[in-house]
Amino acid sequence: RGTPDQAPAHKLKDTDRATFEIVLDRITDATIQYLLKQIEAGAEVI
């Protein structure tokens, strides 16, 4: 469950920047793949 102010994410960013960037890269890669699959499946809007 998320938090209203995203405190855990901000803490990770401040305490372990390398891991934070890895997490963001993985989220970015997964999002790109998801959207590409949506386009391949014929989505008219993404």
Image (cartoon, grey):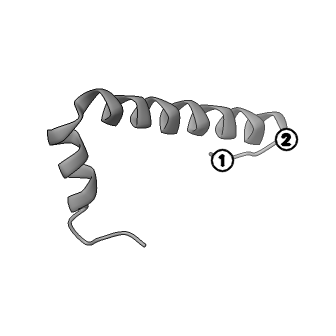
Q: Depth-wise, is mark 1 or mark 2 nearer the camera?
A: 2
Q: Amino acid at mark 1?
A: Val
Secondary structure state at the residue bearing disc 1: loop
Query: What residue sits 27% from the left and 51% below the top?
Result: 9
* Vertical position of residue 15 compared to residue 11: above or below: above
What numbered label is drawn on residue 20?
none
Query: What residue sits 20% from the left and 66% below the top?
Result: 5
Where is residue 8? Give x, y as percent.
26, 58
Q: CA distance from mark 1 to mark 2?
A: 11 Å
Residue 19 lies in what quarter of the image?
Answer: top left
The answer to whether 39 appears left or right of 25 in the picture is right
* Vertical position of residue 35 compared to residue 25: above or below: below
Q: Amino acid at mark 2?
A: Ala
Q: Which residue is mark 1?
A: 45
Nearer the observer, 44 or 36: 36
Label 1: few (<14), some (14–19) or many (≥20) C-alpha neighbours in 10 Å: few
The answer to whether 18 appears left or right of 43 in the picture is left
Where is residue 45? Give x, y as percent.
66, 47
Nearer the observer, 31 or 15: 15
Where is residue 1? Give x, y as percent.
43, 73
The outermost residue toward the front is 15
Secondary structure state at the residue bearing disc 2: loop
* Vertical position of residue 3 compared to residue 46: above or below: below
Q: Which residue is mark 2?
A: 41
Residue 44 lies in what quarter of the image?
Answer: top right
Where is residue 20? Give x, y as percent.
32, 36
Query: What residue sits 83% from the left and 41% below the top?
Result: 42
Quadrant containing the C terminus is top right
The outermost residue toward the right is 41
Residue 43 lies in what quarter of the image?
Answer: top right
The answer to whether 32 appears left or right of 20 in the picture is right
